[in-house]
Amino acid sequence: MTLRNITTRSVILLTTLLLTGPTTLRGGKLTRWVNPLLGTATLWDENELGFKRSKGFRPWGGEVFPGAALPNAMVQLTPVTKYRSGAGYQYEDQSITGFAHTAKGHWNLLHVPLMPVTGDVDPDHFASPYSHDEEEAHPGYYSVELKRYGIRAELTTTLRCAYHRYHFRNTRKQSVVADMRRSNNHVSDWTLEQTGQKTFKGSQNGEGRIYFYAESNKKLAHIKEKKGERHTIHLITFEETEDREPLELKIGFSFVSTENAALNLKQEMEGKDFATVRQEADDTWEHLLENIGTEGGTDKQRGLMYSCLYRSFLWPCLRSDVNGEYRDARNQIVNNGFRYYTNPSFWDDYRNKLILLGLLQPEVATDVIKSITDRGEKSNGYMPTFFHGDHASTFVAGSWLRGIRGFDLQRAYRLLLKNATVPGRGGRPYLDEYLARGWIAEKDTTNVPTWDEYKAAVTKTVEYAYDDYATALVAKEVGDTKNYKLLKERSMNYRNLFDPETGFWRGKNDKGEWLSDFKPFYPYYAFQYREANAWQSLFYAPHDPEGCVSLYKNKKKDAERKLDSLFSIPWKGYEAYNFTGFMGNYCHGNQPGHSLPWMYYFVGKQEKSQVILDSLMNHYYDMGKEHLSYAGMDDAGEMSAWFAMTALGLYTFSPADPEYLVSVPLFPKMSLRLPNGKTARIIHSGTGRKIKDIRIDGKKMKGWFLRHDILEKGPTISIATP
């Protein structure tokens, strides 16, 4: 089902809307606009990629999964077409090898794959061809026809449980392959055993041991191990009957114990049939999507808006059970009275998604902060990080200052302060250098290949400066004046690697000299810049954009020229896995430059920002021949949240600060339902892109930033353009 299909199928709906008013304001079914297949297709077209593809090279796509899941749930029940490939599903693949129960989009998870089969199966070759024409994906529901076996598979979920329903054309010898040796991670060991006439249980150890307890509507004949030449599977076979009833499996999961998995199953699925669970899943998503309303606009825009909003709420994931128990960082079973979640993908989603999470689901954001605090205290005393940087500070500061107060700020601050001030394993890499001189040195070498690993010293320096700023905001809240002043001063360290001669932020060697081999167009994975080139690393100081502009000799004039060049000088055809979707040298397919389009605000040219934002929303989220390709990797929802907040016209330019940079919304009228029960309304009048004025309940707003304390009052925000 593509976005074009959604458009076709929605003609009747749109006719109804014209008669009854906007569905978003009347509680209509917004889930019909969501396409979970969006982002699953790889971007192949060289014109859209920005480079000529090498033989055998597959650019990274959205790397998302299309399967059934609830918001921030433990279980993601999704088809697998290829292991060790993003979230395990690539739209261009032609066969399905199983349905796994956890997914994210970072080449990990995919626990406990199951595959319905008939007759004798070859353990080395049991995947089934399928067609997208016989595939459906909706929030909380997925189905597909497995052509090899004549089986229609349907999947739905609760928070901690999976519901499989398999319609066998042939009623004889119905089996399910339990592919216990496989996941996206290394599987060290597993268990699987029958426990009753219709029940079985087991566990799989691969990025955490997951336990499961399953109930079937049909009697089991046996569970047997079957070995092939290269692979071993377990075959769960059911007794042969003449009835035409589908085979149903209800499976509870837990990261604590099999007993808890059974308890989760009992609490969440007992007495419910497939239709009920599916409807409850749809209702859950509907309630979440209703928080943002739209009026006007096009079918495509509405499909993109709600598909991106849906995609923004799948990670981080729940790891505690219905009784509150979870395994902590020491692998101890504890119950601290909150829902325990995985770490967010901080480097990716601190920019926008975690703030969006707090805006629409503050109770989840609260428990995520409690989770990372608990994890940090029980591991090494540092607040957890992810991949690069130290951006939990931004999440904590931005959440607290937006009124999310259900966590212990002092406990979180102790961890954040250690991250910022104490070098050590688990904290900020190269912090000793940063503390000593205010920047991190890079090796002075030449001809560095894109994928070679170095320090990413420029990116670390400027991001540590912003993390210092975020931590300073927390220090101020807890009354630590000394460290507030220290960290606020250090937040200006982003200036230390600005080269006024070239107008770029660039690396220095350990003598403080500019690196001799400077190639601003060449992309690096970790040399000077993290997954970026010098162009994509411009102007990074979300807390001080005016300060960035002031570093240029002619200030606004020179900064505007630099921005014009960034968005207009063509990408030079360099090929890298995660550099796709270009506008000039701006790369929308990766996170480092995602705030750059707004920098025109700070040189007095807001309208230039809007032209770029419009183009990105209109052309970079349904790319490719199927219109199912993102410009790049979704990274646990960051790319999707960028769209959702940009479409809303309220972007978290500095997510640590409780304010939003206002732009022209995607729809003429939008609404934002806030946790306090009030609703903010955003109205755009005019057809131009240059904002004449912004009014809050009729009163003209000063500047471009809307404070959160004003937003939470539920005002009418009027944005006028010519």
Image: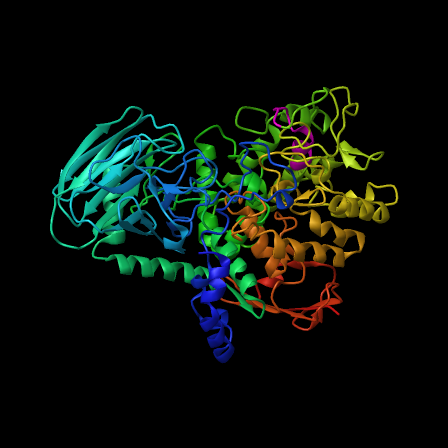
Q: Is residue 458 magenta?
A: yes
Color encoding of the figure? rainbow
Please indicate whether residue 389 sits to the left or right of residue 378 in the image: right
Q: Is residue 45 magenta?
A: no
Residue placed most toward the observer, 151 or 651: 151
Magenta-highlighted residues? 451-463
Q: Residue furthest bottom?
A: 19
Residue sitting at x 75%, y 33%: 520
Confirm whether residue 400 shows in the render. Answer: no
How many marks are shown on the rendered structure? 0
* In this rendering, position of residue 373 left or right of residue 567: left
Q: Position of residue 330 (x, y in %)?
A: 38, 29
Could you say which quadrant of the image residue 13 lies in? Answer: bottom left
Q: In the rendered image, which quarter contains the N terminus? A: bottom left
User: How far across and down, in percent of the image, does residue 128 sit?
Assistant: 33, 42
Instruction: Give the left or right position of residue 474, taking residue 124 as reference.
Output: right
The extreme right residue here reads 554
Q: In which image quadrant can residue 565 be found? A: top right
Name above or below for residue 153 compared with residue 388.
Answer: below
Q: x, y percentage for residue 660?
A: 64, 56
Give the percent coordinates (x, y) of residue 712.
Answer: 57, 62
| Foreground pick, 558 / 590 | 590
Q: Is residue 118 visible?
A: yes
272 w.r.t. 416: above or below: below
Q: Nearer the viewer, residue 619 or 722?
A: 619
Name the quarter where the C terminus is drawn.
bottom right
